[in-house]
Image: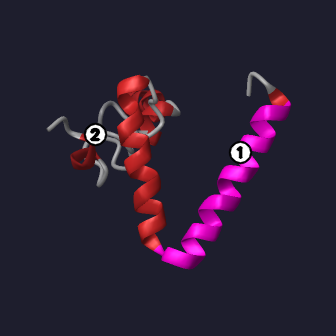
Amino acid sequence: QFITLAGWHSLNMGMFELSKAYKEDGMWAYSQLQQREFANEKFGFRAAKHQAFVGTGYFDAIQNTITQGRASTTAMQGSTEEDQFLAA
């Protein structure tokens, strides 16, 4: 967090609001969060694709190097999430 105090408050308020909405509306609340994420991608928001955002591909590459491309537990290519994020 670049601005530590503001980041702390933002993180905690965001989680409070999500948990409150989740209690009231169930998975619909999570779906609405994702829709806001996708809507903000055009402004530079990148965390909707969370595995790619946190560098999972890097660890997949290391695992594939060690196993000479035979790793069965990589997270990115061929994952259950892969099809969710293809460009329309």
User: Where does label 1 land, which residue?
Assistant: 11
Query: Which of the two discs, 2 and 1, labels the residue nearer the N terminus?
Result: 1
Q: Nearer the viewer, residue 54 or 40?
A: 40
Instruction: Say how the picture is coloured.
Output: secondary structure
Choose top left, top right, bottom left or bottom right for residue 1.
top right
- Please name which of the two marks, 2 or 1, marks the residue nearer to the observer: 1
Give x and y (percent) for residue 21: 57, 68
Q: Residue at x 49, y 75 (%)?
A: 25
Left or right placement of residue 15 versus residue 53 in this view = right
Q: Main secondary structure of the magenta part?
A: helix
Q: Is residue 65 above or below residue 85?
A: above
**Is-magenta flag for residue 49?**
no
In the image, residue 22 sits, relative to residue 33, either above or below, namely below
Q: Position of residue 52 (x, y in %)?
A: 42, 33
Q: Nearer the viewer, residue 35 or 88?
A: 35
Label 1 is placed on what type of residue? Leu
Q: Which residue is mark 2?
A: 77
Mark 1 secondary-structure assignment: helix
The magenta region covers: 5-26
The structure residue drawn at horizontal position 63% and vertical position 66%, both measured from the top left corner, is 19
Residue 60: x %, y % from top left: 41, 34
Q: Secondary structure at mark 2?
A: loop
Q: Residues within 10 Å of mark 1 (few under 14, many from 20)?
A: few
Q: Residue at x 43, y 42 (%)?
A: 37
In the rendered image, residue 25 lying in the magenta stretch gets the answer: yes
Q: Can residue 60 be seen in this snapshot?
A: no
